Image: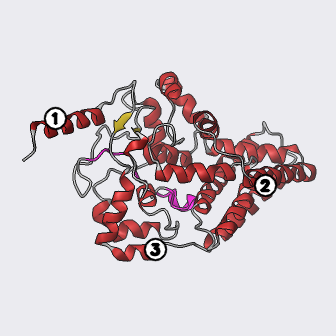
Amino acid sequence: MESPVDVSSKKNQSDAEDKSDKENFLWTYTDEPHRTRRMEIIRAHPEITKLNGPEPLTKWVVLTVFAIQMLCCYLLSNTSIFNWKFIATAYFVGGFCSQNLFLAVHELSHNLGFKEPWKNRLFSIITNLPVGVPFCASFRPYHLEHHVYQGVDGIDTDLPTIFELKVLNNTLGKLFFCTFQILFYALRPLFVRRLPFTSMHLLNIVAQVAFDYILIRALGYRSFVYLFMSSFLAGSLHPTAGHFLSEHYNMTHTKRIATGPDMGKLLETFSYYGPLNPLVYNAGYHIEHHDFPYVPWTRIAKVRATAPEFYDEIPECKSWIGIIYQFITDPNVGMWCRVKRLRSSVKTK
């Protein structure tokens, strides 16, 4: 039988977890959920671990998208950057290609392209080239920390800052955030937690600068503008940019899982199972990815198929376009709809 002190302590923790308004994040004092879920799923379905391992097809998809972007650079090399054809190509072709490359780097950061880790890191630099600006060397360590320290204040740079919460938590602010979202993800780590500069960062920068220089010399400055515009639009008001919001923003108007193995836990990771997944390495399977980060994009859907009882009870994002619209226009959701936790709450072993 629980003592009054135990009951009171649990009530205080529950009250702290439920503290959520438009001036605060959703705070919890529990461990990040995916480590526990992973162990429970493996106990129930030990065969699921056989899905781990690299996917050789990834490199061929990357090289195909690389070729498409180079072809567009060539075809638009004499077209004004203000011409509707230039802008439309950057949005409808380049935007999808750049998002594909962003998420290819994501796959490679988990060593899911090659067996040898060094090959994944070097191929990430090649994958990065058509994006126009170097990012892969910085992305990898921050992203791996996001998996271990999901939601941890001061470590997980995927979380909005207090400044963003205070300034952007209104319709115009949210529109600004969604329009320039890619810049927030690129610059936020510099203000939250800088990581050491390594030889991979230097190689990433040198390779990118050399590539951009050769491209501009060969095809003119418009080719570089096309790549930069494609990358910016991919992380702006673009259908595939909805994955940034759908992954961890709780816009369900409910805070806790209603049924299933995780009943009563705060909702903080979500999946999207829609038609855009094949274009972006099935990035929509985000709960599954956090549960099993070493399962590649070609097999991630099998995680849910193998253990449906662990996924069917969690609300899913129905539309990436729809979630962007909801985020901007719904006054009851905003920058605060993220779960935060203290580092002391996280178990890493």
Which type of secondary structure does the marked residue at label 3 adopt? helix
Residue 193, percent from left and from top: 59, 38
Labelled pair 2, 3 in contact (Cβ < 8 Å)? no
Amino acid type at mark 3: Leu
Mark 1 or mark 3, which has the lower sequence index? 1
- Residue drawn at (92%, 53%) of the image: 218
- Answer yes or no: do the residues labelled 2 and 1 have beta carbons within 8 Å? no
Say which of marks 1 and 3 sits in front. 1
Dot 2 or dot 3: first in sequence order is 3
Residue type at tag 2: Leu
Taking the image as drawn, is residue 90 in sight?
yes
Badge 2: few (under 14), some or many (20 or more) residues near its Cα, within 10 Å? some
The residue positioned 22% from the left and 53% from the top of the image is 259
Left or right, 73 with respect to 262, comes to: right
- Number of the front mark, 2 or 1: 1
Q: Main secondary structure of the magenta part?
A: loop
Cα–Cα gap, marks 2 and 3: 32 Å
Give the structural element (helix, strand or loop) at label 2: helix
Amino acid on which disc 1 is placed: Ser
Residue 59 is situated, as x and y percent measured from the top left of the image, at: 67, 69
Residue 270 sits inside the magenta stretch? yes
In the rendered image, which residue does mark 3 sit on? Answer: 51
Taking depth in this image into account, of 264 and 277 the one nearest to the observer is: 264
Residue shown at the point (40%, 35%) measured from the top left: 337
Closer to the camera: disc 2 or disc 3?
A: 2
Residue under label 1, please give it.
Answer: 8
Mark 1 nearby-residue class (10 Å; few <14, some 14–19, many ≥20): few
Task: Name the residue beneath numbered marker 2.
Answer: 203
As drawn, 330 above or below 77: above
> Could you tell me residue 24's position as x and y percent?
39, 27
Horizontal arrangement in the rendering, residue 161 relative to residue 85 (left or right): left
> Which portion, as a residue range, is magenta?
265-283
